[in-house]
Image (cartoon, grey):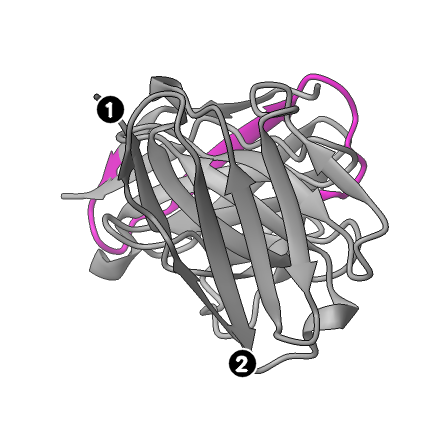
Amino acid sequence: EGQLLESGGHLVQPGGSLRLSCAASGFTFNNYAMHWVRQAPGKGLECVAYISGASSTTYYTDPVRGRFTVSRDNSKSTLYLQMDTLRAEDTALYFCAKARNTYGAFDIWGQGAMVTVSS
Amino acid sequence: EIVLTQSPATLSLSPGERATLSCRASQSVGYSLAWYQQKPGQAPRLVIYEASSRAAGLPARFSGSGSGRDFTLTISSLEPEDSAVYYCQHRVDWPPTFGGGTKVEIQ
């Protein structure tokens, strides 16, 4: 059974930057695509970024495209989300999630990292 | 972007009763539909994938059905620990959107 552990969540001012990390264990990290999913307080789930196992393909949802960058270091079994030009509406709990396969459901989730954007 | 609409928004039932949750897609997603359970303060947990396959460790009272645009998650006999919000999600293309959720309350 694999595990994911996020870190890096913090309070940041509007316009600021933050980098989230997600450390993976218990599975062959480079074999799987990974996602970042966020949940604003009291709201539903929104998938914001995708990266393939070899980092050859990335996708972003419209609200974050051009401001967020997803990356991974397979040698460290770690996923990253670089968030720049942060806005109040980016305030959310950010989860990393492993997909079962390229178009598969998310079978392993981290516990989440809270990002609060406020002055 | 595919829109998933879940109903009802809230389901209040007693232990032992049957829960039926619905998810309708704005266009066909084939069998590429998953269900997740989220309890307060926890990450979502995969319940059903590919419309009807139960995730590892989930009790047999959870089942999924449907294809195309209409899907159902059924909990055959509710237990107190099934109280949670349940989300559906498609995996056809990007972005893999989620439905708005159904809150299951155990009276």
Q: Chain of mark 1?
A: A
Vertical placement of residue A99 versus B1, above or below: below
Tell me, yes or no, whether the two marked residues, 2 and 1, touch with CB atoms within 8 Å.
Answer: no
Q: Which residues are magenta?
A: B12-32
Q: In this rendering, would A75 be left or right of B18? A: right
How far apart are the alpha carbons under marks 2 and 1?
A: 37 Å
Taking the image as drawn, is residue B26 in sight?
Answer: yes
Residue that mark 2 sits on: A1
Disc 1 residue type (three-letter): Ser
Vertical placement of residue A57 versus B93, above or below: below
Q: Secondary structure at mark 2?
A: loop
Q: In this rendering, would B97 be left or right of A46? A: right
Vertical placement of residue B6 versus A105, above or below: above
Q: Quadrant of the C terminus of chain A?
A: top left
Q: In this rendering, would A42 be left or right of B7? A: left
Q: Secondary structure at mark 1?
A: loop
The image quadrant that residue A54 belongs to is bottom right
Task: Name the residue: 47% across, 47% down.
Answer: A19
Please state the horizontal and vertical placement of residue B19, each as a whole percent of the image: 38, 43
Please state the horizontal and vertical placement of residue A84, each as a whole percent of the image: 50, 31
The image quadrant that residue B12 belongs to is top left
Neighbour class for label 1 at 10 Å: few (<14), some, many (≥20)? some
Judged from this view, the residue extending furthest toward the right is A56
B58 is within the stretch colored magenta:
no
Residue that mark 1 sits on: A118
Q: Nearer the viewer, residue A96 or A88?
A: A88
Judged from this view, the residue extending furthest toward the front is A16
